[in-house]
Image: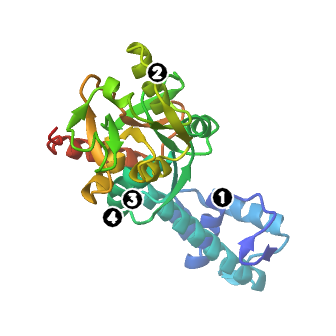
Amino acid sequence: MAENGQLKNLSMDFDQLETFLEVARHASFSRAAEKRFRTQPAISSQIRGIEEEVGAKLFDRSGGRVSLTAAGKAFLKYVEETLDARKAMMVAIAEMERVPRGEIIVGANEGTCLHILPHVFAEFKKQYPEVSVNIKRADYAKVLESIIDNSVDFGVVSLPVNDNRLTVVLIHRDELILIAPPQHPLGKMKSASIGEASKFPLIVPKAGHTRDAIEQLFHERRLKPNFTMELDSSELLKRFVAADVGIGFISRSNVEEDVRAKALVAIALSDAHVRRDLALVFRKDKALSRAALAFIDIAVKHKSAQELVPAPTR
């Protein structure tokens, strides 16, 4: 009839089980009918259906009294466990709707993982410690692929994003700047032109939006850049620039710690303003959990707080 505390291979529903429980508790079909707002024949019919299904008599009706048989007592134990488990499940699901739980998976590139997301996730985990966070590091193209194939809940990528299947929410404002070691000829300058940058060896990303923007800057000015090294890591790019192999272009937020540590100098572009804004991106048809909605809310609030901070003096 039952195995491991669960009803097995039975087609009866929870309504029948609750009827059985009321009859057992009150030792009365008529009292159970009152509690269940049914007629007594309807209650009797439900009990007969259960007895036929389990193949055993569950109640002894002799002598004008209703009592549980041995089979009925065994069945009662499983019914109580089943209904308790159902109640616990309903409470847990309702709780998840009120307090975000579960897991969110976010895809982003190296620089975003290291310099933007830690602040957002720190605030998120402070407010929602029950939600597990999984970060998948990938380049721009692979992050977008992961969003489309639903292997991540969100991607955090640089704008623009041109795909009408995706919802795009701006979460971080940034700009492209030059970086150089402090001892470099540009190191004492607050700003420099693209022409001045073209005089020095350049360390650039192998691909992506930043690489496209760099090539566009030089193309518009009919300048030939001296690409001395191509790297697929923003952290490596910074390390080679610090070693005076060349100068580089990078998002301002990616070098704030290095500038404070005086390992690098941030130099604004005097004749160009290239945005490197970041957006939270997800499928338009995705049903967002409460955890996911909470993450969006915190990421957007983080952007708003960031905008209140004065821009660095150039």
If you read the primary sequence from the N terminus, does the residue marked by circle 1 or circle 3 appear first?
A: 1
Nearer to me, 75 or 237? 237
Helix, strand or loop at disc 1? Answer: helix
Which residue shows up at 49% across the image and 64% down it? 92
Residue located beneath label 4 in the image: 126
What's the distance in space between the residues labelled 1 and 4, CA to CA? 56 Å
Q: Nearer the viewer, mark 1 or mark 3?
A: 3
For residue 291, say whether it is visible.
Answer: no
Q: Check disc 3 and report its element: helix, strand or loop.
A: loop
- Amino acid at pointer 2: Lys
Badge 1, how many Cα within 10 Å: few under 14, some, many 20+?
A: few
Label 4 is placed on what type of residue? Lys
Given residues 40 and 219, the one toward you in this image is 219
**Residue 203, horizontal then vertical, whole percent:** 47, 39
Residue designated by label 1: 41
Seen in the image, is 313 located left or right of residue 132? left
Position in image of residue 307 (x %, y %)? 20, 40
Query: In this figure, which residue is indicated by the disc labeled 3?
Result: 99
Q: Position of residue 161 (x, y in %)?
A: 47, 26
Q: Is residue 28 left or right of residue 131?
A: right
Instruction: Check disc 2 and report the residue beneath it.
Output: 224
Question: Which callout, 2 or 4, points at the residue further toward the start of the chain?
Answer: 4
